[in-house]
């Protein structure tokens, strides 16, 4: 009798262990089953380490950017389109971690918890993106052999029309890339740069929202200003300036003094409200943080931070959303890349979630918009951006005594048929009103009209 009881207990223990193991297995399957199914050793998806089974990727107009036929993965036949969309579409080896081939691998292969990667088409799910392939080519050609990025999105709908990064590569022929520095980095999402004078827009916003009767605040520039016994230089001798004239003249002395008047806490709070010191995402893809850290800085360094120097760093995507927030009357319609996903059965899943982020008051957005418009009409030359009703700000980001500054140009169009926010940064290209502004003008003029 004792022997029977012992055997019964043993059976119960084994059964419990089996159930626990089964539960653990299915729990792990639910959590990481997608990683198991899409692991590079899965011969249903990969051949010689290269992804071969995945659905079509098309641009907004149906141009096929990548597809699978008879167990082989192909890209668009035009090398210009392949190179211009390389960082958006991604490669077959997963080197571009933010590209569609990596970031949306589950969707492309058609993975689900029940069927794994098996589906009727044998090739996965198709994905339609918001980007314009032809506009991407224009941006890539405008950047040329310089390193940098161009990002453009519709601030009314959230659609990203252009996400180009250089140096680029041909995803259909990836030989000899080991020597290319940063070739797989999508600089729009993963780049980090000193902002230079584009940060003055953050300081201006903080002044508009925190200083009573801000128009009465006037500061003196005598080719700079002394702060804490140290000299902060300016390129002009601007005399007495208020906030609007300080922005149009991009006066370092005035903005440093605005920063000191605001104080570290208020300026940091404004910066964080528009995306600094946090990890932003685009369609679930994590972007590099923009950083504004001044709590331990002395007064002269804090002054420099208010004009985009000191240790300020900016991620281009974050600043693109900031431009969208100003253009959108204080609220940013969040940018997205994937328009929809369709299966073999005809089911279509729309990806845009219509996310909106409040960044500032309507009054502050309207004032900033008008000030940026005045930048263009009074300083940059409105004729250079005909038909765009452009609102913009340049940035010349100093990065060391021996290096040519990075060139920034950011802003948005107020023309009803081109509701586009943009960011352009070109590494080691000098003043923002030079290379970056010319690239922006060329690409925005080529952008399709919206109705």
Image (cartoon, helix red, strand yellow):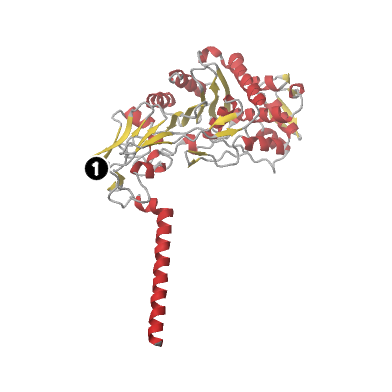
**Where is residue 325, by image quadrant?**
top right
Image height of 17 relative to 101, above or below: below
**Where is residue 180, by image quadrant?**
top left
Count of numbered badges drawn on the protein: 1
Q: Residue at 74% x, 29% y: name it.
A: 211
Give x and y (percent) for residue 416.
51, 17
Image height of 405 relative to 288, above or below: above
Residue occupied by mark 1: 71
In the picture, measured across the screen, residue 278 lies left or right of residue 164, that is right
Give x and y (percent) for residue 121.
27, 41
Looking at the image, can residue 401 be seen? no
Q: Does dot 1 land on a helix, a strand or a loop? A: loop
**Farthest residue, direction left:** 70
Q: Residue at 69% x, 35% y: name it.
A: 267
**Farthest residue, direction front:** 1
Seen from the viewer's position, the closer of residues 334 and 193 is 334
Seen from the viewer's position, the closer of residues 79 and 434 is 79
**Farthest residue, direction bottom:** 1
Looking at the image, can residue 323 be seen? yes
Q: Residue at 55% x, 42% y: name it.
A: 279
Q: Residue at 39% x, 79% y: name it.
A: 8
Image height of 176 relative to 397, above or below: below
Give x and y (percent) for residue 182.
44, 39
In the picture, measured across the screen, residue 295 lies left or right of residue 349, that is right
Give x and y (percent) for residue 382.
55, 13
Picture quarter with the N terminus: bottom left
Rate crowding at label 1 as few (under 14), some (14 to 19) or many (20 or more) other CA atoms within 10 Å. some
């Amino acid at each position: 009798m004792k022997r029977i009881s012992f055997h019964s207990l043993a059976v119960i223990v084994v059964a419990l262990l089996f159930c626990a193991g089964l539960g653990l297995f299915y729990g792990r399957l639910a959590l990481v089953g997608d990683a198991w199914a899409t692991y590079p050793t899965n011969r249903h998806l990969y051949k010689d380490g290269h992804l071969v089974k995945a659905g079509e990727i098309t641009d907004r107009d149906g141009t096929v950017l990548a597809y699978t036929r008879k167990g082989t993965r192909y890209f668009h036949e035009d090398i210009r389109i392949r190179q211009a969309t390389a960082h958006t579409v991604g490669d077959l080896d997963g080197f571009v971690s933010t590209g569609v081939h990596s970031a949306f691998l589950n969707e492309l292969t058609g993975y689900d918890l029940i069927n794994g990667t098996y589906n009727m088409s044998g090739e996965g799910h198709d994905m339609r993106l918001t980007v314009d392939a032809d506009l991407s080519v224009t941006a890539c050609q405008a950047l040329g052999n310089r390193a940098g990025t161009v990002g453009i999105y519709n601030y009314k709908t959230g659609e990203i029309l252009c996400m180009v990064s250089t140096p680029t590569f041909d995803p259909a022929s990836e030989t000899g890339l080991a020597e290319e520095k940063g070739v797989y980095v999508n600089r729009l999402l993963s780049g980090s740069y000193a902002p230079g004078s584009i940060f003055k827009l953050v300081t201006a916003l903080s002044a508009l929202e925190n200083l009573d009767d801000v128009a009465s605040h006037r500061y003196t520039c005598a080719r700079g200003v002394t702060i804490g016994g140290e000299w902060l230089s300016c390129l002009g001798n601007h005399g007495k300036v208020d906030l609007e004239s300080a922005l149009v003249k991009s006066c370092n002395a005035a903005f440093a003094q605005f920063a000191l008047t605001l104080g570290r806490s208020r300026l940091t709070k404004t910066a964080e409200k528009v995306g600094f010191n946090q990890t932003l995402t685009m369609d679930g893809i994590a972007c590099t943080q923009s950083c504004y850290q001044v709590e331990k800085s002395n007064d002269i360094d804090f002054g420099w931070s208010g004009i985009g120097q000191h240790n300020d760093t900016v991620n281009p995507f974050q600043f693109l959303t900031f431009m969208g927030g100003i253009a959108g009357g204080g609220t940013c319609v969040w940018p997205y890349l994937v328009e929809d996903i369709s299966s073999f059965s005809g089911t279509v899943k729309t990806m845009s979630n219509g996310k909106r982020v409040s960044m500032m008051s309507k009054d502050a957005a309207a004032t900033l918009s008008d000030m940026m418009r005045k930048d263009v009409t009074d300083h940059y030359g409105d004729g250079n951006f005909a038909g765009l009703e452009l609102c913009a700000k340049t940035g010349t980001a100093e990065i060391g005594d021996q290096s040519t500054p990075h060139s920034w140009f950011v802003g948005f169009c107020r023309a009803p048929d081109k509701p586009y926010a943009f960011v352009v940064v070109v590494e080691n290209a000098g003043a923002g009103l030079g290379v970056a502004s010319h690239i922006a003008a060329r690409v925005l003029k080529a952008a399709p009209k919206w109705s």
